[in-house]
Amino acid sequence: MSTTALLSMEEIGKSFGPVRALDAVTLTVRPGSVHCILGENGAGKSTLCNTIYGTVSPDTGTMSLAGAEYRPRNPSDALQAGVAMVHQHFSLISTMTVEANLLLGRKGFRPPRRALAADLDRIADAYGLQIDPHATVGDLTVGARQRVEIVKALLHDPRLILLDEPTAVLDPDEIDALITTCHALAADGRSVVLITHKLGEVARAADEATVLRGGTVVGGGRLADVPLPSLLTLMLGDKKPHTATSLRRQGDSAPAVEPVLELDGLTVTRPDGSTALTDVSLSVGRGEIVGVAGVEGNGQSELTALLSGALPADAGTMKLDGVDLTGRSPAHRTAAGLAVISEDRHAEGIIGDLSIAENLALPRLKDYRRWGLLDRARIRADAVTAIADYSIRAAGPDAPIGSLSGGNQQKVVLARELSTPGLRAVVAAQPTRGLDAGAVAFVLERLRAAADDGAAVLVTSSELDELLAVCDRIVVAYRGTLLGPVSTDSPTAATDIGVLMTGVPA
């Protein structure tokens, strides 16, 4: 691997109002390398990538690319220089086909469909990234949409590709494929900057790593010289990550069996005619946390959409405290005490242009009305309290939620949903996706606290260790059915769940 820098950043600084997002950041990315950027949510990782990509202009410092001055005014400048980026949040148009999305912005009277098809074949052969160009983006799973985003970046034939939390929405096989892609890109002489919170992926993918904390570089180096525990210590500082037994109820503290959330015979058909859920039945008791494990695409997304009221059931019923909510609106379900933490916070959980205070108040605007007008002072005061209670790093309640890091956006969603009046049940879909170790622990602790206060909690996640850490029992989603359950008190729980993920009933 060459020692000459492909990308060099010197003393880069950037502020957003009173928040110092980057402070004198110096970074070197070498040709033919995979360089991981680590740090807690709000540490400045995404701002750093956006600075390289031309979305954000630094206040101070300089950058060079392959030895030449590099000051992109916008992403178009970056792409022309050979720098591409895959953002943490999707930029695809859901109502269009994959092919139409990939052809957007192409010049010429006729869309170059043959050339695109040849490029897609080349990328699939070289990197194992298979996509269906004729599929409608809105019908794809989250993982498939992420693959399209990566392919879209690779179509520009970049010499430097920035991947902002690309594995957060991928299943284990897709993560393996992505790591293989990173290695293949590096072998071709390209460089990859990879943001991830998962140290296991860092160990498999990276040549070097840099750790940010509070917008400042606090350490890093070649992986051959820096052990992973040292990187974790640099990321967390004095914080400690959760352990696999830290949040589970034990023995005589097992939850009561009184059912709160009851699903019976739920069946859902996708728009393409395939079956997403088949005869799904499940009961979650008061004070209990039940996990739904499994590889993405086995019906988990549809289950969450069905429970939230966004998707109708073809058959079956959903009850909350004995009240049938099947077919009722999302607003009616919220009023009944159901909180939903959606799978894709950016698309479904927040409105980026609205303030933190406005996002927190959205589901309960009627509660803030006085003489027909919104009591904005009360909305703002409640937001100030939520920001403090949930350790949300932001300039204040009036800051646009879109200006926050992904982890802090998730904390706003968590604060809003867990403060649902008369909270009876919580449905949390991938609640720790894209979060660092400290934020993961915070989310799991809040879910455990909600259960301790009497709520029934249903959590879907692809992170088995987190489910084992917080759940009382776990079921496995497999081809639209739920297998199990497995008690997390069992010493063979992880193995038993692994067997169920192959489709073998308990």
Image (cartoon, rainbow, N blue to C red):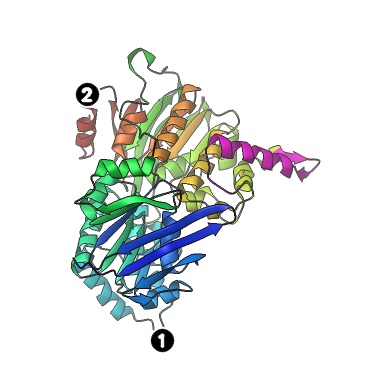
Which residue is located at x 40 percent, y 80 percent? 106
Q: Secondary structure at mark 1?
A: loop
Residue 459 visible at all: yes
In the rendered image, which quarter is residue 506 located in? top left
From the viewer's perspective, is residue 409 above or below residue 486?
below
In the rendered image, which quarter is residue 290 located in? top left
Q: Secondary structure at mark 2?
A: loop
- Camera-side residue: 373 or 139? 373
Look at the image and say whether residue 394 sits in the magenta stretch.
yes
Q: Which residues are magenta?
A: 368-396
Which residue is located at x 32 percent, y 57 percent? 194
Look at the image and say whether residue 122 sits in the magenta stretch.
no
Amino acid at circle 1: Gly
Residue 31: percent from the left, percent from the top?
25, 68
- Camera-side residue: 309 or 486? 486
Image quarter where the N terminus lies is bottom left
Name the residue that disc number 2 marks. 491
